[in-house]
Amino acid sequence: MPKLVYITNGVSGPGGLERVLSIKASYFADAMQYNVHIIALNNDSSDLFYNFSKAITFHNVKATGNPFSYLKQYKNGLKNCLNKINPDIVSVCDDGLKGLLLPYIIGKPCPMVYERHVSKNIQIKKGASSFLAQLKNKITFKLMDIGAAKYNSFVVLTNGNTKEWQLKNMSVIANPLSFFPKKESISALNSKKVLAVGKQSYQKGYDRLLQSWKIVTAKHPDWELDIYGTISEKEQLPKLAEELGITKSVHFYEPVKNIADKYQEASIYVMSSRYEGFGMVLTEAMAYGVPCVSFDCPHGPADIITHNKNGVLVPNDDCDKLANGLLQLIEDDGSRQKMGTAARRDVERYAIEKIAIKWDTLFKKIIRTI
């Protein structure tokens, strides 16, 4: 029974990384008979947003104080946990710089895999165009490349993500589906609802979505846009909706555990992200037979959506075309139904049973070759 350790920042939140980890780690513990441990940072595993297998052992590393004290506590805490567990393989799920540099921080107690869940572009912040900001990003990217090369395997989620890295140890393994409902439970695609899911942030591009929705709602005021995700006052989305005159048709909601119900109620899913690591929400919506309209951002949507077959892809940052894509599916019931059927069929390739085999093969190959 191989001992598998996941190292991550948190396990209790409602984010996509936590959702993916709950699915993969639980499947490895329950179906593939791995001895699974999860080491989290300053995280209480007693109140989890997602369900994790009871067979998983959780460990919490505490680190506080100034950067030097914090790093020392983190390093010692991780090393103590790993010494006790004595794992066969470690998989790091930390998209920050410290995660990439972990083999240098703690050494390599066993073969180590890095899982990259986001695009490199996440380092580029809104308005970060000054010389100092660009220099900082350049240095950060160089450190990221140095850390990434130290891992036995560096795993990205899409073929597009491979273009961001110049590595010889790279593999592509997509995120697994969170669920695949029975046919009788999929969306009927007859509601006048468009859905978006994800925390309010610069990355998710909801400001762009609201600009597009202004065009849509002018033609179809009876349709509604529901956005679920951690609300950020900094993004000022309600204010933007008010300025655009679309408050009656746009609704903002905090994350919900029963997000599957929201997919079931929707007729169209929309993704307005500036960049992604994958786009798991697309596959979740498609599993419910809901066709998606998405910016062709780096990276993920182009791997998942085949334009005008199982959804609609539009050029990144073209709000008019995003609106046109939504209007296309709103105004053509037949096209919406046809693409929804194709979407559900096409995402079966992301079933956890198929994705886990790829991970199992990679883990065992690395263990054998060390």
Image: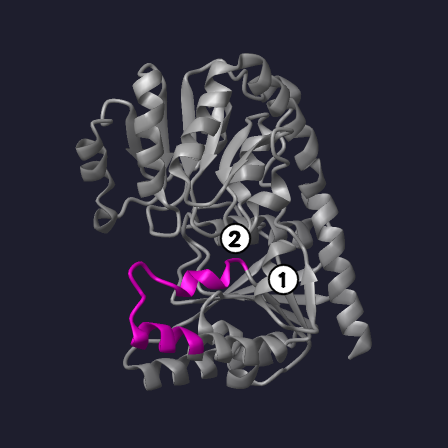
Determine the residue positioned at 61% across, 49% down: 175
Residue 188 picture quarter: top right
Q: Is residue 283 left or right of residue 246?
A: right
How far is mark 1 from mark 2, CA to CA?
11 Å
Mark 2 is surrounded, within 10 Å at the Cα level, by few (under 14), some (14 to 19) or many (20 or more) other residues, namely many
Q: Type of residue at label 1?
A: Thr
Q: Which residues are magenta?
A: 117-138
Q: Is residue 289 above or below residue 106?
A: above
Q: Is residue 267 visible?
A: no
Is 166 magenta? The answer is no
Residue 1 image position (x, y, % from top left): 75, 64
Determine the residue positioned at 52% across, 74% down: 100
In depth, the one of 74 and 325 nearer the eye is: 325
Q: Is residue 182 above or below residue 282?
A: above
Secondary element under disc 2, as helix, strand or loop, is loop
Mark 1 is surrounded, within 10 Å at the Cα level, by few (under 14), some (14 to 19) or many (20 or more) other residues, namely some
Determine the residue positioned at 50% across, 58% down: 118
Q: Type of residue at label 2?
A: Pro
Display colour scheme: one colour
Q: Is residue 57 above or below residue 111?
A: above
| Residue of label 1 | 162
In depth, the one of 267 and 61 nearer the eye is: 267
Q: Which mark is residue 298?
A: 2
Q: Is residue 370 left or right of residue 171?
A: right
Determine the residue positioned at 45% across, 69% down: 96
Is 133 magenta? The answer is yes
